[in-house]
Amino acid sequence: MVSATLSTKTEIKGFKSPTAKLATFEIESSATVAGWKLVAVAAPSTPALSKSGIAKPSSSEVELNAEASKDGLTIFFDNLQLLPKRQFGPRVKSSTKHALGSGGYKVGVDATFIARGNTSEGKAKTPAPTEVLKLTLKPDSIRGFTPKMDYSTAKNVAALEVKTNVDRFLVTMKGEYDLKSKALGNASASASTTVKLPEDVKAKIEVKSDASGKGELMKGRL
């Protein structure tokens, strides 16, 4: 059986010179075949609104992404609209969970292989020049703090993210460590909260340590 969902998210960035953008407008369809969950998402380019007026979408292309997952293995097919330009390379992610000791504490492990030519992470969807390996460790929460550690061969940088709830706010702290130069960098913090509005609309407000911020209006099904 195939199901389809239409979702949208409007994003408002900045406080001094705010800009509004229909950040996502997606049509998602899914089905299960022989135990594999298949998902396809189509997302057209969207306009932005600022003090100077409405800006046209930067591209007329419809972004097409698909994935197939089963038993912790997910194969991603990113930006299929670029196939005619021969810009394509799949991603493969393996997700497992491991118990440490007898106390029930567990650590999730995501290992991702990004093939050469994949366009999921490059700026302006530029193809990856080499193969990339990514490792993510997601331990269980410790006294209300949820850590996550990432490493990628693309930049040889390890990143640590810690999240915790303070009242109604989700506080996120991030930091990076360059393994080549052995230097710390890109430390940041942010706080966000989500409010439910009528008609199944959610508003999310986020404030960052660099004094920037953004708001989002999200509706999961239209």
Image (cartoon, grey):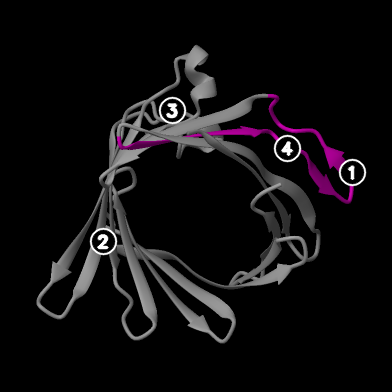
The structure residue drawn at horizontal position 25% and vertical position 45%, both measured from the top left corner, is 71
Gap between marks 2 and 4 measured at Cα: 35 Å
Horizontal and vertical percent for residue 132? Answer: 29, 38
User: Which residue matches tag 4?
Assistant: 46
Q: Amino acid at mark 1?
A: Gly
The structure residue drawn at horizontal position 22% and vertical position 69%, both measured from the top left corner, is 106
User: Which of the two discs, 4 and 3, labels the residue nearer the N terminus?
Assistant: 4
Please indicate whether residue 139 sits to the left or right of residue 168 in the image.
left
Q: Nearer the viewer, mark 2 or mark 4?
A: 2
User: Which of the two discs, 1 and 4, labels the residue nearer the N terminus?
Assistant: 4
The structure residue drawn at horizontal position 38% and vertical position 79%, both measured from the top left corner, is 145
Horizontal and vertical percent for residue 168? Answer: 59, 82
User: Which residue matches tag 3?
Assistant: 127
User: Which residue matches tag 1?
Assistant: 53
Gap between marks 1 and 2 measured at Cα: 46 Å
Looking at the image, residue 13 lies above or below residue 33? below
User: Which of the two discs, 1 and 2, labels the residue nearer the N terminus?
Assistant: 1
Q: Nearer the viewer, mark 4 or mark 3?
A: 4
Residue 108 - label: 2
Q: Amino acid at mark 3?
A: Pro
Q: Nearer the viewer, mark 2 or mark 3?
A: 2
Looking at the image, residue 75 lies above or below residue 11? above
Is 80 covered by the magenta stretch? no
